[in-house]
Image (tube, helix red, strand yellow):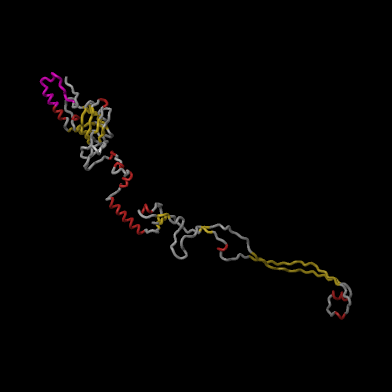
Amino acid sequence: MATYVNDLRLKEISTGDESGTWGTSTNTNLELVAEGFARGTKDCFSSDADATETMADGATDEIRKLYLKVTSSATLSATRTLTLGPNTVSKVWIIENSTSGSQAINISQGSGANVQIPNGAVKVVATDGAGSGAAVYDLSLVDLTGTQTLTNKSIDSDNNTITNIVNADIKSAAAIDAAKIANGSVSSAEFQYLDGVTSAIQTQIDTKTTLAAALAGVYPVGSIYVNATSSTNPSSLLGFGTWEAFGAGRVMVGSGGSFSGTGGDSTVTLSTSNLPSHDHSFSASFSGTTDAGTATITTGKFPNYSADNFTAGRNTLEEAALSGNTATFTSSHTHGFSGSVSGTTGSTGSGSSFSIMNPYIVVYMWKRTA
């Protein structure tokens, strides 16, 4: 009884079998051996799902061919798995992923390792035929589409040196870290600085250097740089010089006149000596009368009276005195008064300071020191 236990699923004729047809079966086997070195195409995904292709026993089958172009009549929406059967076949395949939908495909045989083939790529794979636990191995160092791929492989520079790789096409999924380039001192973040470069880097550096040199002449040491919104040090913005923050809380005044160095205040408190000379005066007037009361005068006799001692027109008091009698004289009158006063009023004010600032706007100022 014939069996198909070999890796190409050829008919193995038992002793005494195939009488009269042995030649035909043998020729078919030879054709299938040749098929194992051929190139074929097969629609392996008739639906958007995983699929299994089992090599036919003793009959022509595209799956048997060495170079297998895998296509799909369905448009794949995700990575799908193609399982190659039977899981006892140990064989080498060159597989091209030509499916629709721009999806990768996984090549599997059992529960062991799989190999993923990106859409449009070609890989050399080998199945180990280990049954339910069979694995698929990636033998690819070169993508047979003509581009160079190095996927999940390490290169021993002493024993397996690869040279003269031309026009290498490294897939974006490879995620090669920049630290592995050159001496490893360049980080991935530093490589991002090249983003947006539109011409030779050296040309752009020379242009920037020339611009910086020109600006250095515009801003010699001692110059003031002013920016209305950015507090960034000008050495970063302009690419030259050493700068220090300048004039915090002060306005600038042109040199000359009575101005030199720094000075001034934002507020001031006036003292008495700062005020112009002036007076605060007041005046007042008044008038009225006072009652002086009554005055009484009593005369006594004049001794040694002699009529010759007095002249005519004597008043009553005199007459009384001359006659040797006493006399009393009573008189009453008032006194008028008037006058004015002057002096100073009481003090006022608190002596608080007040602002003498001009209208201003805050900016960032830097002074070049070197």
- Image x and y of residue 209, in percent: 31, 54
264 vs 279, left or right, is left
With 353 as the anchor, is 254 left or right in this view?
Answer: left
Magenta span of residues:
9-29
Question: In which quadrant will I find the C terminus?
Answer: bottom left
Q: Does residue 10 show up magenta in the picture?
A: yes
Image position of 355 (left or right of 231): right
Q: Looking at this view, name the residue that lies furthest to the front.
A: 158
- Residue sitting at x 85%, y 74%: 317
In the displayed structure, 101 sits above or below 191; it is: above
Q: Position of residue 7 (x, y in %)?
A: 19, 26
Is residue 227 located in the magenta-colored stretch of the structure? no
Q: Tell whether 344 sits left or right of 84.
A: right
Q: Is residue 187 above or below residue 124?
A: below
**Residue 87 horizontal/vertical position (percent):** 24, 26
Q: Quadrant of residue 155?
A: top left
Residue at the extreme top: 16
Q: Would you identify the image quadrant in which residue 43 lies?
A: top left
Q: Quadrant of residue 149?
A: top left
In the displayed structure, 288 sits above or below 352; it is: below
What residue do we see at 32% from left, 47% from top? 193
